[in-house]
Image (cartoon, grey):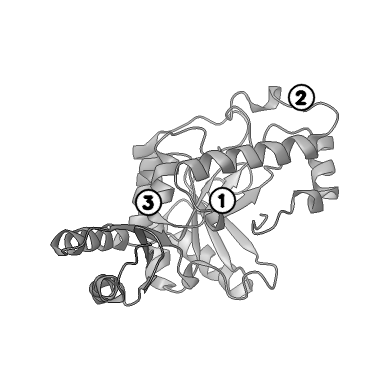
Amino acid sequence: MNFVSKSIVGAIAAGVAMVSGAAYATPKLPCDTAQLIVPWKPGGGTQVLYALVEKTISELDTPYNLKVVTVPPLSAWPQGWGKTTAVMGVINLTPDSFSDGGLFNTPERALRQASKQLKAGATVLDLGAQSTRPGAEEVGADEEIRRLIPALQEIRAAHPQAVLSVDTFLAPVAEAALDAGANWINDVSGGRRDPAMLPLIAESGCPYVLMHSRGNSKTMDGLTDYGPDVVKAVLQALEEASDRAQLAGVQRDQLIWDPGLGFAKTTEQNLQLLQELEQLVQPGVPLL
């Protein structure tokens, strides 16, 4: 049985610590692969850490494989996570969202609303720059980024400790958001819409809200046939989507499930899901 020496992994961990300020490593692993667990940081730090680790590994004289795993740092989760209910405040940076479209679609307005929600007790802020109401037009990644990033940067600068989520189903938007300081990615498509999304989430190690939905904003209202039990159907779909995410390298403890109320659901189905939410609670997977 082979062991990776503590000095080898320690050398890499020390190098990573120079950039990240923290690193965790398995000092002795009874196999040919050691895991170096790197805390993911918003703002592009993940790419720097990977480059450093790869450079360090290439300079080591070792026959063993070293696997780098990024995980969310404690700061990516609200205080009291897993012990108390967290409250998510929603800020739409769009002109056409169903509830607050046009109210907060400038960086200044978005920042004022973010500060108001945090003061009122919100523990996560969810920023969206693409309306997902029924019938909404998709604006594309470039326009979504144009709407999102200035507001995200303003809020991050004013509230460096806040947990910020970005609602997008496009990988280029998610990548830009993570580089600008977002903590979570909230994907209403559950990874269906953009094949590059799940690999990005796996590489970044950030928390990922995986939502149940069908179709898109134009078609979802006609996709509400779930047979006799919508709760069972949604649970099965969430499990299947989670399996796909894990096959792409996403860790189970990155996932947060969202049953997708209002997305390809009738009013009666939404009410049934709310009444039977406990059936969707699975070990180790938070529910939004």
Mark sitting on residue 225: 2
What amino acid does circle 2 point to? Asp
What amino acid does circle 1 point to? Val
Is residue 45 something one can see in this rendering?
A: yes
Q: Name the residue under label 1.
A: 209
Q: Mark 3 points at which residue?
A: 203
Residue at point 65%, 69% (across, down): 82
Q: Quick check: marks 3 and 1 in contact, CB under 8 Å?
A: no
Residue 199 picture location, percent across and down: 40, 43
In the image, residue 222 sits, relative to residue 26, either above or below, namely above
Q: In which quarter of the image is residue 153?
A: bottom left
Q: In which quarter of the image is residue 18?
A: bottom left
Residue at point 65%, 58% (across, down): 286
In the image, residue 40 sits, relative to residue 6, either above or below, namely above
Q: Which of marks 1 and 2 is nearer the N terminus?
A: 1
What amino acid does circle 3 point to? Glu
In the image, residue 222 sits, relative to residue 24, either above or below, namely above
**Furthest residue to the front?**
1
Instruction: Name the residue nearer the viewer: 282 or 271.
Output: 282
Q: In this rendering, would 283 be left or right of 248?
A: right
Residue at point 84%, 48% (across, down): 276
Q: Earlier in the sequence, mark 3 or mark 1?
A: 3
Residue 165 picture location, percent across and down: 50, 57
Instruction: Name the residue nearer the viewer: 79 or 148.
Output: 79
Under tag 1, what secondary structure? strand
Mark sitting on residue 92: none
